[in-house]
Image (spheres, rainbow, N blue to C red):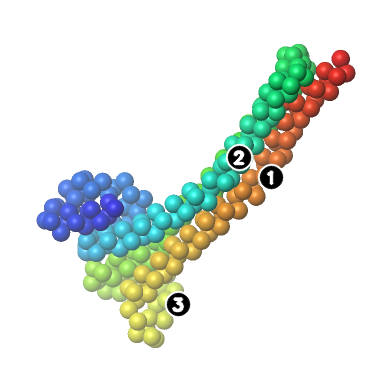
C-alpha cells in the first residue's frame, strides 16, 4: 500500500520528497519506476497508483506461492530429520548403534552421513531459491507508458524508455486506432500474470524436484546411521 499512500500524500498537498519519506515507498522493489516517472516529469500520482496495481498482483502471487511451498518445505524438513530419527529409534529399541558410532569406524560413518545431509540441505535450498526468483513485467513497456503520460513526442518517448521501435504493438496501435498507452498497460499486466503462472508452476512442481537431491543424500545417510551400525554390531 506504500504507492497508494504516496499518491494520497501528494493529493493532500505534501511535497514529493516528504511524500517519499513518509510513505516509505523507496523500499518498494519498483521504486525505480516511480523515480523514473518523477525525473521524467510524468504524473506521479497516476504512476504511483498504476504501480500499486502491479504490487497488488505481485502480493497475491507471493501469498499463493507461499501456500504452494508448504508441502515441499515440510517434505524437506521431514527428509532431513529422518536419518537422525532413525538413529534415535534404533538406539531406543536396544540395538546400541550409538556405541558403534563412537568407534573409529562409526565416527567415519557419522561424518559421511552428516556430509550427505549437508549436501542435501544445500541443494534443496538452491532449488527453493531458484523457484522464488522475483520476475517483473516488461519494464520497457512500463517506462514507455510513463513517458507517453508526460505528453512528450512519441520518438522522444521511445528513446527514453528503451522500448523496441520495431515492436508489433506499435504497428497494431496505428492500424487499429487503439490507444498505445492502453496496449502497453495490457502488455505489462499480461507479462506480470505470465510470471505469476510460471512461479506458481515452479512452486507446485518443487515437491517432486526436491525428492531427487533429498533422496540421493538422505537415504544413504539413513543407511549409514542405522543399517550399517546395526550390521557392524551384529558382526561383532
225 to the left or right of 145? right
Query: Dot 1, crowdedness within 10 Å: few (<14), some or many (≥20)?
Result: few
Are the two marked residues, 1 and 2, in contact with CB atoms closer than 8 angstroms? no
In the image, 139 versus 61, the foreground residue is 61
Which mark is nearer the camera, 3 or 2? 2
Residue 45 in picture, x, y percent from top left: 22, 61
Q: Earlier in the sequence, mark 3 or mark 1?
A: 3
Q: Secondary structure at mark 2?
A: helix
- Residue bearing the label numbered 1: 212
Question: Toward the viewer: 139 or 6?
Answer: 6
The residue positioned farthest toward the front in the image shown: 93
Mark sitting earlier along the chain (3/2): 2
* Mark 1 vs mark 2: in front: 2
Q: Which disc is residue 44 wearing?
A: none
> Please, what secondary structure does the residue beneath circle 1 have?
helix
The tag on residue 76 is 2
Toward which corner of the image does residue 147 lie, by quadrant?
bottom left
Residue at figure coordinates x 53%, y 51% from the top left: 68
Nearer to the camera, 144 or 72? 72
Image coordinates of residue 37 in percent, x first then y, are 27, 60
Residue 139 relative to residue 107: left or right: left
Q: CA distance from mark 3 to mark 2?
A: 46 Å
Q: Which residue is mark 3?
A: 168
Residue drawn at point x = 36 percent, y = 57 percent: 56
Mark whose residue sits in front, 3 or 1: 1
Q: Crowdedness of circle 3 by 10 Å Cα count: few (<14), some, many (20+)?
A: few
Amino acid at each position: 500500500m506504500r504507492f497508494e499512500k504516496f499518491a494520497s500524500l501528494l493529493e493532500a498537498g505534501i511535497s514529493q520528497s516528504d511524500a517519499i519519506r513518509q510513505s516509505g515507498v523507496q523500499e518498494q522493489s519498483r521504486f525505480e519506476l516511480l523515480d523514473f516517472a518523477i525525473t521524467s516529469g510524468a504524473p506521479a500520482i497516476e504512476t504511483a497508483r498504476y504501480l500499486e496495481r502491479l504490487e497488488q498482483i505481485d502480493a497475491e502471487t507471493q501469498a499463493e506461492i507461499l501456500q504452494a511451498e508448504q508441502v515441499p518445505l515440510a517434505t524437506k524438513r521431514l527428509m532431513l530429520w529422518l536419518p537422525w530419527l532413525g538413529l534415535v529409534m534404533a538406539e531406543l529399541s536396544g540395538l546400541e548403534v550409538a556405541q558403534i558410532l563412537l568407534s573409529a569406524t562409526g565416527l567415519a560413518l557419522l561424518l559421511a552421513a552428516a556430509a550427505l545431509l549437508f549436501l542435501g540441505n544445500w541443494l534443496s535450498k538452491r532449488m527453493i531459491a531458484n523457484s522464488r526468483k522475483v520476475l517483473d513485467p516488461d519494464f520497457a513497456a512500463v517506462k514507455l507508458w510513463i513517458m507517453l503520460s508526460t505528453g512528450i513526442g512519441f520518438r522522444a518517448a521511445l528513446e527514453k524508455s528503451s522500448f523496441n521501435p520495431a515492436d508489433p504493438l506499435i504497428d497494431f496501435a496505428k492500424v487499429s486506432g487503439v490507444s498505445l498507452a492502453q496496449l502497453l498497460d495490457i502488455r505489462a499486466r499480461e507479462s506480470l500474470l505470465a510470471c505469476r503462472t510460471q512461479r506458481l508452476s515452479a512452486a507446485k512442481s518443487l515437491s517432486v524436484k526436491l525428492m531427487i537431491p533429498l533422496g540421493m543424500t538422505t537415504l544413504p545417510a539413513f543407511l549409514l546411521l542405522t543399517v550399517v551400525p546395526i550390521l557392524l554390531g551384529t558382526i561383532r
